[in-house]
Image: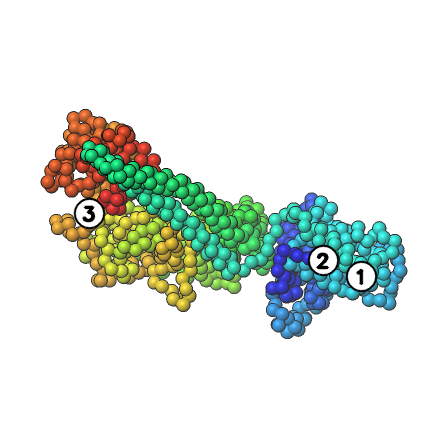
Amino acid sequence: MDSGFDTSKFSMLDLFSIEVETQTEILTDKLLALENHLRQSQIPSDLNLILEALMRASHSIKGAARVVQIEVAVKIAHLMEDCFTTAMNGTIPLNLSQIDQLLQGVDFLQQLSKVREKNLENWLSQHQQQAENIINALVIAPVAPQEQKQLNPAPQQEISPAIIEAKAYPVSSTSEDAIVIDTVLSNEVETDELEPKVFSSLAPQREEDQSYLDLSSLFLDQETLPTAQQVKETLSSALSLISTAPPDKTRFVRVSSDNLNRLMGLAGEALVEAGFLNPFADSLLNLKKKQLELSQLLEKLDSVLSKTHLTVETETYLKAIQQKERECRETLGERLVILEQFAYRSLNLCDRLYREVIASHLRPFSEGVQGFPRMVRDIAKQLNKSVKLEIIGKGTLVDRDILKKLEAPLTQMLRNAIDHGIEFPDERAALLKPSQGTIRLEAAHRFGMLCITLADDGRGIDLEQIRQRVIDKQLVKPDLAQQLTDNELLEFIFLPGFSTSAAVTEISGRGVGLNIAKTMVEEVGGNLQATTKPGKGISFHFQLPLTLSVIRTLLVEISGEPYAFPLTRIEQVVMLNAHEIFSLENRQYFSLNLQNIGLVRADQVLELSPSKVPSEVLSIIILSDQFNRYGLIVDRFLGERNLVIRPLDTRLGKIQDISAAALLEDGSPVLILDVLDLMRSIDKLFSSSEIKQAQYDFENNILEKPKRILVVDDSITVREMERKLLENHGYQVDLAMDGMEGWNAVISGDYDLIITDVDMPRMNGIKLVAQIKKHHQLQKIPVIIISYKERQEDRLQGLEAGADYYLTKSSFHDDTFINAVVDLIGKA
């Protein structure tokens, strides 16, 4: 039978561990819920359902333990099941003391499930006394068994425990089910020696769940009990039918993170390769444009030759050339349409594949916090406090790597909240607060980020106490400390060794927990802030990326090479005029919002060859940390990109200022900068005497100038459309509203390209082009005519006047216009 899962990679003990992990989570959640009701002298309305779930969970552990023959686990799980059974029957109700003992049993089973197979015997020997204490604590008064009718009793024969304990088993395609069912079937038990109660106990636990197989219905209608072989054949047949039925619920399989990472890398590569098709299609568009130019030249040639006498043979060849050219152009157009359709489908498919792989890397928030309720309960009990943990957004999907990193800081912050934040019950009563304190842990997706809030309703933080501690530790001068805002003061609690508690306990007080959290959040490109209301509690707000596999970045050029900055680490980007820079103590600064910000060149920080910075306008990225803000000068901005993170080879070690790599749409590599590391490098460079100033030579114009274009058109709509298109591609644009104004601008300015309309008042475009081409100093300036006129004679008139391109205004709707500009003067 194909279970849909490769169980060969798992040992029986591995499957036992998986089963215990799943069932102990249920046990812990339900027992804590019962305990909370008991502490408030309440009886839950769904008490029977809770006890039934607890009974099933302990029974499942008992069955799994029997399969792997760990008798101590069988005994503990069996006694736990008895406790829940008697409580459900009302014989011996559960109390707080029993719940304590049951939770100790759960702890023992959890610890046992994590022991490696080679160490199991030694571990059981070392913890034998602990196990005996738990067993003795869980022993309850026996309940008289119900009398049952016997059929063919076999008192002398020992019946397999796995069969005796068999109940309706949830049959699905998980490895646990496949292994356990196979194990039961493999036991050679003569069924004619079994009592009917064995089969009558095989009733389904939940009729509404179709994934449960009613084993009792397979045999109870038979007059004689079947043989072992018949049992195997019947069960195999029934299980094969169930395996083909559609599952009612979402199924989960365990996949190693390495496999997922490889799959993600392949999906990312497929997406990059599919992205190559669009640039290839664009190149064919350029080819189509050149064929059109060839067609125009042939038409010119035909027009010229028509005025002369041609032989029949020459005229035949000319017509044949024109015909072949038209056929090639039509064929290319058809193939181009097919290619564009294929490129769209391929890109869409790869994008969907990639998104699905990304989604598979996400796990529910509940998986990372399932142990927190128990921890909170134990610590609160140790401190004689009453604390309730509310977890909201358990189903919120989180990157599995982030989820793993969150466990340690959240654990320490919860310990801090219980120890320092939540008051003792009598204190809370005096403050007219509920005797039970509340800690709220919430996860949600907001604005494309994972937002986690950890809040308590305790005493909060005394901001004046923080201010005094800052002064005592000499972190800032006393006069400056008095000027710090509440938010600025709260930033100090994240420093290593900074604690508002004078006492150090086993639980908290060393001043490292919040620093660990802050460091982790910054490492993954997130943000952590605190807010507090004295006497009302404190809240910590995490803002984290949804996934560590894909990152939104700003792509820039430094020394002619692309680099990527994570957007979450950038405070602001600005375009700065060079004359706004001023020097203080041989350092360059500029002013932003009444604050001086130090300037440093990115090529110097990264130890690259000097960049060619534009002479008038600088591209600046503003970076900041808790203490400093800097403006980093880059060559130019290339736009925002979603990049698939590729870890660097571990053999390279930690590369300074670099965190990872990625591939762009065209397959070229790009390095992703480590902003925290970069800030440390800038700090070091800015405080040294080696910092180089950005040099500008306006008089000699040594550095590259921005490319300047003059747009001449009498329509304000067309002028503004052209200006926006050109400026979006980095060009500097001037405007003129008619031919005369355009001519005056040309002779007085310095332009790399002229773009003009045809029909305009005072001087039309044809005359403007002709005058430019007649001027010995201006004739080399390329000119593009853009007009609504599409007739061939109008086109020829413009080209004969000296225009390099004659385009129609419909070219604004695709890349034809921009491609023509780039073809004449290059990119901005």
Cα–Cα gap, marks 2 and 1:
24 Å
Q: Is residue 587 visible?
A: yes
Q: How is the image coloured?
A: rainbow
For this rendering, which residue is in front, 301 or 389? Answer: 301
Residue type at tag 1: Ala
Q: Judge left or right: residue 482 versus residue 539.
A: left
| Image: 343 above or below 17 | above
Residue type at tag 2: His
Q: Which residue is mark 3?
A: 705
For this rendering, which residue is in front, 495 or 235? Answer: 235
Quarter residue 137 falls in: bottom right
| Image: 806 above or below 529 | above
Mark 2 or 1, closer to the camera: 1
Q: Which residue is mark 2?
A: 59
Residue positioned most to the top = 761
Q: Which residue is mark 1?
A: 228
Q: Residue at x 77, y 60 (%)?
A: 163
Q: Residue at x 22, y 53 (%)?
A: 612
For this rendering, which residue is in front, 624 or 594? Answer: 624
How crowded is the residue under tag 2: few (<14 C-alpha within 10 Å), some, or many (20+)?
many
